[in-house]
């Protein structure tokens, strides 16, 4: 577990919704530098919406989000662009461009945010693909690789600008258990070797236990954070019964599996 330090992300009193519907209300939490931080909750709890706020795609009704001490909710123009260079994003289905090779996909952020020559951008893209064990696949098209490889290529693209933070939205979605476990190991390896902070939205319990240093759980009923801590702490000591049942995969009636 990373040591205590000034948080790299601070969410303060965040409230948001659509139309007249509140999605979450008055959320406050920190993400520590260098940790793997997981956001989870049941369907409709707002976990992916929260991530979109943290990367600046949505504006909240109230509150603010500090990325490395700078408020992304208030930033505009060049200041906002500079904040956004500090993080990378892997979207739920990878979001690779099907008409581009893996190298070209990973090169995109470099083309947008830098003035490097093409050969330098290609070298960086190739090095990022190597980091996720996709060396030799630089010229492959997304349609020619597996789902797990596409997720790793998307992580490589998210790392193109050497960000301090990587946001991953449902990285294990659509993957079989073995491929999902391999992706978990990739996340852990990158966190350990690069010191990158990961913010991961998921409801895959096996992945949560494998990668998470800390978890927050959103609740659709209260529109609040109902639990925060390590997966093991929440499994054994959460005050909320629903949280304990989630981490122990139990329903209220018969002790069977519970799904988010």
Image (cartoon, grey):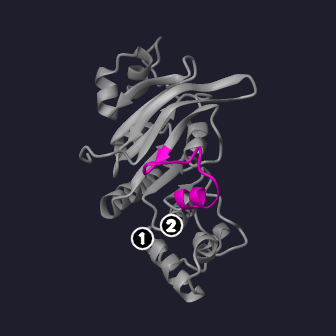
As drawn, 32 above or below 239: below
Give the side of residue 132 with respect to residue 42, left or right: left
Does 76 appear in magenta?
Answer: yes
Looking at the picture, how far across and down is residue 178, in whole percent?
A: 44, 52
Looking at the picture, how far across and down is residue 144, in whole percent?
A: 64, 70
Pointers 1 and 2 in contact (CB under 8 A)? Answer: yes
Q: Residue furthest left?
A: 3
Residue indicated by mark 1 = 131
Q: Nearer the viewer, residue 176 or 200?
A: 200
Q: Tag 1's secondary structure?
A: helix
Give the side of residue 23 with respect to residue 67, left or right: right
As drawn, 116 above or below 13: below
Q: Residue furthest right?
A: 19
Q: Residue at x 58, y 77 (%)?
A: 103
As drawn, 229 above or below 211: above
Which of the two labelled residues, at mark 1 and mark 2, occupies the earlier sequence position?
Answer: 1
Q: Which label was assigned to residue 156?
A: 2
Q: Which label was assigned to residue 27?
A: none
Q: Residue at x 59, y 68 (%)?
A: 145
Dot 2 crowding, Cα within 10 Å, few <14, some 14–19, many 20+: many
Q: Nearer the viewer, residue 214 or 93?
A: 214
Does 197 appear in magenta?
Answer: no
Q: Tag 2's secondary structure?
A: helix
What range is drawn magenta here?
66-83
Image quadrant assignment for residue 82: bottom right
Where the N terminus falls, by quadrant?
top left
Q: Residue at x 50, y 36 (%)?
A: 203
Can residue 179 be seen by looking at this rendering? no
Q: Give the CA distance from mark 1 to mark 2.
A: 7 Å
Can residue 151 be seen by looking at this rendering? yes
Looking at the picture, how far across and down is residue 192, in whole percent?
A: 30, 59
């Amino acid at each position: 577990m990373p040591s205590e330090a000034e948080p790299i992300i601070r969410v303060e009193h965040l409230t948001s919704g659509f139309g007249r519907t509140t999605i979450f209300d008055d959320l406050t939490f920190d993400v520590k530098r260098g940790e793997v931080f997981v956001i989870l909750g049941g369907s409709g709890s707002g976990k992916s919406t929260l991530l979109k706020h943290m990367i600046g795609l949505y504006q909240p009704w109230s509150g603010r989000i500090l990325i490395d001490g700078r408020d992304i909710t208030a930033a505009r123009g060049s200041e906002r662009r500079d904040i956004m260079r500090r993080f990378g994003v892997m979207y739920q289905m990878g979001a690779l461009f099907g008409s581009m090779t893996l190298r070209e996909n990973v090169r995109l952020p470099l083309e947008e945010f830098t003035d490097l020559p093409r050969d330098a951008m290609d070298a960086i893209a190739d090095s990022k693909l190597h980091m996720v064990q996709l060396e030799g696949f630089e010229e492959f098209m997304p349609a020619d690789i597996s789902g797990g490889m596409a997720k790793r290529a998307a992580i490589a693209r998210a790392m193109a600008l050497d960000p301090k933070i990587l946001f991953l939205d449902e990285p294990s979605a659509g993957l079989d258990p073995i491929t999902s476990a391999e992706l978990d190991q990739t996340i852990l390896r990158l966190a350990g070797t690069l010191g990158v902070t990961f913010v991961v939205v998921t409801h895959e319990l096996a992945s949560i236990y494998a990668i998470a240093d800390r978890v927050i759980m959103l609740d659709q009923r209260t529109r609040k954070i109902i639990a925060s801590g390590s997966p093991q702490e929440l499994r054994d000591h959460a005050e909320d019964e629903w949280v304990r049942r989630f981490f122990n995969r139990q329903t209220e009636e018969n002790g069977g599996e519970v799904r988010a």
